[in-house]
Amino acid sequence: MGPLVLDHVPTSLLDLLNNTLILRQTAPHLPISSLCALAKTSRALRQIIRQSPQAFRYLDLSPVKSAICPIEEPLDTGGNNWRRERMDESLTEDDFYSGPLRSIFSRLHQQHVLHNVHTLVLDGLSVTAEFVKELMTEERYNVRLLSIREVKHLNQRKLQQYLRYAVRPSRPAGTPRVKGIYLFGPREAAPLVTSPSKRTASPASLGVMSSPGAQIGAEWNQKSTDALNAALARTEDRWYRSSGRMMTKRPSSDWAEILQACEGIIAFDAVLCRGPRHDPAKAYIRDGSDSSMPHPASFLRPAIATVALGPLGCESCHSCPEEPAIFGESPWTQFPLLSPVPLHWCSTRAAQRPHTLDGLCPPPLYVRCEDCLKGRWCERCHKWWDENCYGGSSTAQRTELQQTELLETLDTSGSTQLIPKQTIKIVGVRRDCFGCGHTCISCKELFIRQCKNCGNEYCREDNDASSDTMCDWCNYTSRRTVEMY
Ligand SMILES: [Zn+2]
Ligand SMILES: [Zn+2]
Ligand SMILES: [Zn+2]
Ligand SMILES: [Zn+2]
Ligand SMILES: [Zn+2]
């Protein structure tokens, strides 16, 4: 029996897909396998799917099995057999690793649909730097948004060279066609698999996690923290919330220079840190007290902002020296491409625009590199202090600072007056526990306790065998003593 062929497809489906708007809205939701299967069912459908520029506008090959390189090991081990079978000595490493993708694209080219692909997702596949270069330079491709997150066999150095070349001042007009690249962030989790969110400071997560009840409680607590975080930022987009570290791997400093070179030409799912220490004009200002000592505000090379700090700004002044990126006011180059890759639009502007829960203007964007946050950012609750409010020190520590707060009071005439009031605040962060990282004083008070037996400090969450009053060692010893007698 041959494949199922429908001579008379219900006119309704044909009519529907013949509508450009409907096809544009529907096609990105269909896996490419379904789209191809649909095209096989009737001549009329095949015509629509092959000829409409909408059907292949968004192409996600990441779930396609034939796009995966069959052999994972490097060429010299597993590749030799494959090479022998092919009897082809001229095969290069690049041919080998990008072979599966190349064959898919040559088929799409033959079917005259390759030029319609504007958004291309290749996350997790075997994608070589040479292949990305082809995508950017060859006429037959027309990709505007490219996602190559967590891909294999990508030579980063080569890719950097190709990008530098693609954006050179003498480049041909209208190139590069690729305007946005997703490269640094994690790829989207498969639907239905919820990735465990980063733990956040919360008293209820302190309990022992062995009982299912406690686990459910902690889960609910995480959910409510996420909800609160989203409500504060008024958006689900992680870059605009106090999400902390946004990348699993810290990108090398070379990448920061590539982002600089591509500024205004190719956007990425990351932006440069604009902290004052990266600005040579501001970094070398000395405070005058001791000019022979290196000033804490010394110059830093360009760096990619890897930490999302949330919409509130510095804990004390609710701003920062470099000013947050404000949507609609700040240059586009200050906004990262947001995940997920947009389904229906292929412009970088659409990919940069956060979706607010209330439909109003997006919140201010505070992002920085970790060097600019050293000693001034709590890794648990993500509160932070800027250079104006906390000088910081070379070793991460907490400092008592006298701060002036303006208190609103009513005077005798009944009008409000602002009265300055001096308060002592503990600012800065310290590493009290390896698991917690650098934390502020409030997080320390939540997690770090003093053992009533030995007097040492311990972390209630990271020292599994500890109790509410005793460190793991004393707790273990006392229990063993009870068991022995
Ligand atoms: Zn401040
Ligand atoms: Zn920085
Ligand atoms: Zn904290
Ligand atoms: Zn801890
Ligand atoms: Zn103890």
Image (spheres, helix red, strand yellow):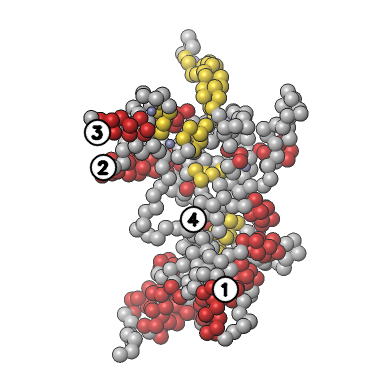
- Marks 4 and 2, how far apart at CA: 31 Å
Q: Which residue type carries mark 4?
A: Pro
SS label for mark 2: loop
- Beta carbon at label 2 within 8 Å of ligand 4: no
Instruction: Tell which of 433 and 465 is nearer to you.
Output: 465
Reading the image, the residue beneath label 2 is: 211
- Marks 1 and 3, how far apart at CA: 59 Å
Q: Earlier in the sequence, mark 4 or mark 2?
A: 4
Would you call the spot at circle 3 few (<14 residues within 10 Å), some (14-19), or many (20 or more)? Answer: few
Q: Earlier in the sequence, mark 1 or mark 3?
A: 1
Tell me residue 270's x, y (percent): 57, 52
Q: Which residue type carries mark 3?
A: Glu
Residue placed furthest toward the left? 485
SS label for mark 4: loop
Q: Nearer the viewer, mark 1 or mark 4?
A: 1
Q: Which residue type carries mark 1?
A: Asp
Reading the image, the residue beneath label 1 is: 76
Tell me residue 420's x, y (percent): 55, 16
